[in-house]
Amino acid sequence: MRRDNQSSVSEFLLLGLPIRPEHQGVFFTLFLGMYLTTLLGNLLIILLIRLDSHLHTPMYFFLSHLALTDISFSSVTVPKMLMSMQTQDQSIPYAECIAQMYFFIFFTDLDSFLLTSMAYDRYVAICHPLHYMTIMREALCTSLVAVSWILSCASALSHTLLLAQLSFCANNTVPHFFCDLGALLKLSCSDTSLNELVIFTVGVAVITLPLICILISYVHIGATILKVPSTKSICKALSTCGSHLSVVSLYYGTIIWLYFFPSSSTSSKKTIIGSVMYTVVTPLLNPFIYSLRNRDMKGALEKLLNRQQFCLNNICSSL
């Protein structure tokens, strides 16, 4: 069935962030700086992993995909938000809005699955160190990433196809800075009970179950550490798991605060603040967490800088 038969809305209006007009310039500069830092930081992680052979391990294989996902995830919403702040044009075409919603859900779910794969990698590394390379072989790592992409695509596609069947009548104002699925469902004049059922069931599959798997992995890691209670083993565990735990806490902490503890009085503002946290702040902080808390990444960065300095010295000496 054609979209014209399903919806009389050709575009939506994104209200954006609750910012006063006189503060638009300041926040535009702030979010632009954060977005560019996100791009450069995550691209640097991908570059370091690509160039340093010591980082060609399962853990950093997953991390490179997580960095790529963070770049894509942030790019789904932030450029449109910045454009709206700069031009004051809040409209977004129907097709572009649906596409934005699809990719937002896709990369949200992909983040969740990749963090779960990384937790399994840490579990094998600490609980079964002698069999680590046998278990975490290249074929398994590739399969885990491929399955993560497939499941994320299926999840996002299910929501998108169901939303495309809904009718949107007079009200086309989205009280958000991007096309959020929940906000769009509230605008529909069709029955959304099936959509809400799918949100619940798929949400359990792509958010709750991965979180449970991550928690189980760290329970086993904690139990393994307690069997050999030494300062060396604790420090080793913290060095290998600390960065991942920080990202997991930031990612899932925001989602739990946003969706599991709703506040009816400030729900709209709270939703927007929470969304900014995991669409702008989390992808921004991930490179700093993995670079500042990880000796391997810091070592790779130092080698890259030394290599660049050596090349510059050679160029200067030849002039």
Image (cartoon, rainbow, N blue to C red):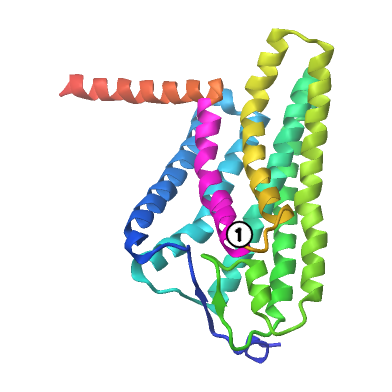
In this view, the residue in front, 222 or 27, is 27
Relative placement, left or right, of 299 versus 25 is right
Q: Position of residue 22 (x, y in %)?
A: 32, 63
In which quadrant of the rendered view does residue 189 lie? bottom right
Q: Quadrant of residue 106?
A: bottom right
- Is residue 241 in view from this perspective? yes
Q: Residues within 10 Å of mark 1 (few under 14, many from 20)?
A: some
**28 sits to left or right of 130:** left
Q: What residue appears at the point 72 percent right and 68 percent down from the top-left corner?
A: 159
The residue where tag 1 is placed is 271
Q: Is residue 199 magenta?
A: no
Q: Residue at x 68, y 78 (%)?
A: 164
Seen as rendered, the residue at the extreme left is 319
Quadrant location of the C terminus in the rendered image: top left
The image position of residue 33, as x and y in percent, is 38, 48
Magenta stretch, residue numbers: 267-292
Tell me: 227 left or right of 142.
Answer: right
Q: Is residue 285 magenta?
A: yes
Who's the residue at 70% across and 20% down the image?
Answer: 237
Residue 1 image point, x, y percent? 71, 87
Picture residue at 79% right of the left edge, 24% below the top: 221
Q: What is the count of numbered marks?
A: 1
